[in-house]
Image (cartoon, rainbow, N blue to C red):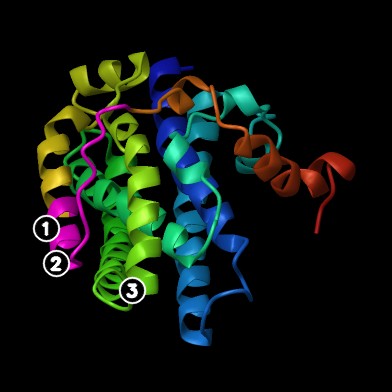
Amino acid sequence: MNNNLYNYIIGIADNSLILGQRLGELCGHGPSLETDIACTNISLDLFGQVRSYFQYAAQVSGDEKTTEDTLAFLRIEREYKNVLLVEQPNTDFGYTIVRQFLFDAYHLLFLRELENSKDQTLVAIAKKSVKEVSYHWRFSSDWVRRLGDGTTESHGRVQEAVTDLWMYTDELFHQTDADQAMIATGVGVNTSALKERYYQMITEVLEEATLEVPESKYWHKGGKQGIHSEHMGYILSDMQYMQRTYPNMEW
């Protein structure tokens, strides 16, 4: 097994998996029918991407017992390598949108670069996914503008979400050993090179939304090393319940 490639794929996929699960929690609970459906569709887009990544990871693993389902549902918490940002809770609609917004900007930049990978399977996934994520970015950034430059109530709530979630953004650009190995071979994306453009994209929208860019330089990290927030265990208990309660169940 190519351990570096396997771990690199898992690191990409877990971000979409956990964020998709978070959005899925909102199904039927959106502030309006149209928004509810949009969030659910974004969740489905992310799960579709995850399936492609996990199928490839299972192939790379060389283990017949490893499947997209075992990777999604049967790992323990420390084996998930998603960033802390995507596991933050749906505190209110403002938090949900800002979390999506902060991830979408990174995700879009990342996929555009992944299209240039030397790994053609990753290129194919990126080319399909970038179309979906372009919409995700448009949806979340439009809502940030709408809420930020809206009522006093919406402005205050979104500003609070931006301030609280900002400290999770720097981890998006941290590089694991697998990341560095894949960058060296031309397979992976050098995320450090995306950082300046990312914060430029974010800042432009926040300014349009009359929101303040946080000045805090304290950053939370650890998710990429499997060290998660207290929220992760609750996410996995919901997500893994059926597979662990009824092992080897088939539909």
Q: Quadrant of residue 167?
A: top left
Nearest the camera: 92 or 39?
92
Tell me if residue 116 can be seen. yes
Nearest the camera: 251 or 17?
17
The kind of secondary structure element at disc 2 is: helix
Report the label total. 3
Q: Kindly indicate whether the residue at mark 2 contacts the one at mark 1 (C-beta within 8 angstroms).
A: yes
Q: State which tag comes first along the sequence, 3 or 2.
A: 3
Find the magenta span and give its range: 202-218
**Residue at the image position 41 percent from the left and 25 percent from the top:** 221
Q: Tell me: residue 96, above or below residue 11.
A: below
| Amino acid at dot 1 | Glu
The residues bearing labels 1 and 2 have C-alpha atoms spaced at a distance of: 6 Å
Let me know if residue 23 is in the magenta part: no
Residue 215 at x, y percent in the picture: 21, 38
Let me know if residue 213 is in the magenta part: yes
| Amino acid at dot 3 | Thr
Nearest the camera: 111 or 68?
111
Residue occupying the far front of the picture: 152
**Residue at the image position 33 percent from the left and 47 percent from the top:** 163
Residue 7 at x, y percent in the picture: 45, 24
Q: Quadrant of residue 138?
A: bottom left
The residues bearing labels 1 and 3 have C-alpha atoms spaced at a distance of: 21 Å
Q: Which mark is residue 152?
A: 3
Query: Label 1 crowding class (10 Å Cα cut-off): few <14, some 14-19, many 20+?
Result: few
The residue identified by callout 2 is: 208
**Residue at the image position 82 percent from the left and 53 percent from the top:** 250
